[in-house]
Image: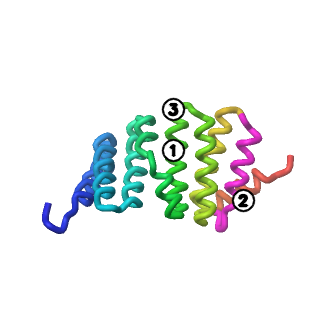
Amino acid sequence: MNEKTSPFQVWNEQARQAYQTGNFILAAQAYGRAAEAATHAGDELTAAEMKNNQSVAYLRANQPQAALDALSGAAEVFAQAEDYRRLGMTYANRASAWQALRRFKEAIRDYERAAEALEKAGEDQLRYEVLKLLSALYLSRLQLLNSVIALQAGLAGLKNPTFTQRLMKKLVFLRL
């Protein structure tokens, strides 16, 4: 490590490389170290972002409890900074971990929180993706009406829908 390379940069690069090669456990551990380095440097937003990355790596490694634990405090940091995009991503990551743990009530709550935050951020495509995940969760729980409502909400919020999304919009909003 040269004088210009910070510990955060070293850990972040190691995490990125490990993630790209599919070594998700090593990536999660390195993202955790990057979060610690960012916290030590006084950069709470970057630390929270690294916790998000760590959570995703743990989810990819099929360790949902570790993914959930990694997100401790991240939502509060983004909420305080009014960084609604990253707050929405944090809630979506938490929802994915809850879902993998088969804690569906908590997953639904966090998918809904994610959608609200992403709407505040003006992230219509990301909001749509989150509501699609929520719709699929409702469908898997045989809550058909809730599934359709979630999908409709996601589609209705799109500013520039793709061709496929426009087609889905026509199908979902048909009156039977």
Locate residue 10 relative to residue 44 in the image: left or right: left
Q: Which amino acid does label 3 sit on?
A: Leu
Q: Which of marks 3 and 2 is in front?
A: 3
Q: Residues within 10 Å of mark 3 (few under 14, many from 20)?
A: some
Locate residue 72 relative to residue 158 in the image: left or right: left
Q: How far apart are marks 3 and 1 (CA)?
A: 11 Å
Q: Which percent across, then down, holds residue 85? A: 53, 61
Q: Which percent across, then down, holds residue 6? A: 22, 62
Residue 4 against residue 47 in the figure, above or below: below
Q: Which of marks 1 and 2 is in front?
A: 1
Task: Please name the residue shown 65% across and 62% down the image.
Answer: 163
Locate residue 18 relative to residue 176 in the image: left or right: left
Task: Please name the residue shown 14% across and 60% down the image.
Answer: 1
Q: Quick one: 42 or 1, which is closer to the camera?
A: 42
Q: What residue type is labelled 1?
A: Arg
The magenta segment is: 143-161
In the rendered image, which residue does mark 3 sit on? Answer: 101
Q: Which percent across, then down, holds residue 37? A: 28, 55
Which mark, residue 156? Answer: 2
Magenta stretch, main secondary structure class: helix
Which mark, residue 94? Answer: 1
- Dots 3, 2 in contact, CB < 8 A: no
Q: Quick one: 176 or 88, which is closer to the camera?
A: 88
